[in-house]
Image (cartoon, rainbow, N blue to C red):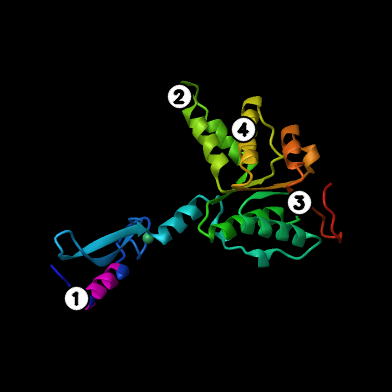
Amino acid sequence: MTITAAELAAKMQRKKSYVPPNVHYCCSECEGTGFVYQLSREIDFRGKEVEVKRWSNCSNKTKANLISQSGLHDSEYTKTWKDVRDISNTNVAKEAIIETLERGFGWVYLWGEVGTAKTLMLQIAVSEYQKKLKQARYVTMANMTDKIRLAFDETAQNVAIDREITKWSAIKLLAIDEPDRVKQTEFVKQRVFQIIDNRYRTREQGITLMAANVPPDECDPYFASRIGDGRFEVVHLLGQDMRGVQSYG
Ligand SMILES: [Zn+2]
């Protein structure tokens, strides 16, 4: 069976404009299946011209998946660098993050008092990185440790917790807010250490951003030793009334 180019175009058009009702995830490109195809005319082994569907992932679905895994609310997701007020040395932090996003790997540790846009900058980094269709996640340390604690199940040989550690270790861009704020049990602390250590060892493959209230040397020793590594950027954000640039060191 053959169809004309006009019929093919009409068919593609119908496919594009059809949006199924009552589907949780509505996408006019893939109808919620997550896959799209292009029809192409090819010659089969008998030398006959046939119509073949070439399937690929729907880019809207990829985007939606990334957004759902970002850890950001809609209102946070739409923020951009323009929303960061140019106070004190937010520009230094901004540049350090942008450079790291462009490079595709590395660590940036921001610290300073409340009201210095640290959280906002982490969130923008996540949403900017996802615009390149790359996996990025914002999380508070409190939230991450909760998830680790919930995954712990003595009866299941810790499969869930291993999975949790692997997941947090492998996220392409992980932005951890308030790493210094959580009282942890020894058990959770060990698991967090494993994640940080995995990310440290693969520091040339992924990005780790942190925003804390204290300088690295006031963090847990296991943090301090890794963040103190000269290859990482540490930016001290000063309060609004102060001017100038100061970096940790
Ligand atoms: Zn789609």
Q: Residue at x 66, y 46 (%)?
A: 177
In magenta, the rendered stretch is 6-15
Residue 7 forms part of the magenta stretch: yes
Residue 206 screen position, x and y as percent: 60, 47
Tell which circle, 1 or 3, labels the residue nearer the N-terminal end: 1
Within 10 Å of disc 1 (Cα), the crowding (few <14, some 14-19, many 20+) is few
| Residue designated by label 2 | 156
Residue tagged 3: 114
Tag 4 near tag 1, CB within 8 Å: no
Find residue 152 and report its horizontal and vertical position in percent: 52, 28
| Label 2 or label 4, whichever comes before in sequence order | 2
The span from disc 2 to disc 1 (Cα, nearest Å) is 58 Å
First-in-chain label (3 vs 2): 3
Q: Residue at x 48, y 31 (%)?
A: 160
Real-space CA distance between mark 4 and mark 1, rounded to the nearest whole angstrom: 59 Å
The residue to which callout 1 is attached is 4
CB atoms at circles 2 and 1 under 8 Å apart? no
Which label was assigned to residue 194? 4
Q: Is residue 53 left or right of residue 74?
A: left
Residue 227 shown in magenta: no
Amino acid type at image mark 1:
Thr
Principal secondary structure, stretch drawn in magenta: helix
Counting residues from the start of the chain, the first of labels 4 and 1 encountered is 1
Q: Of the residues tagged 4 and 1, which is closer to the observer?
A: 1
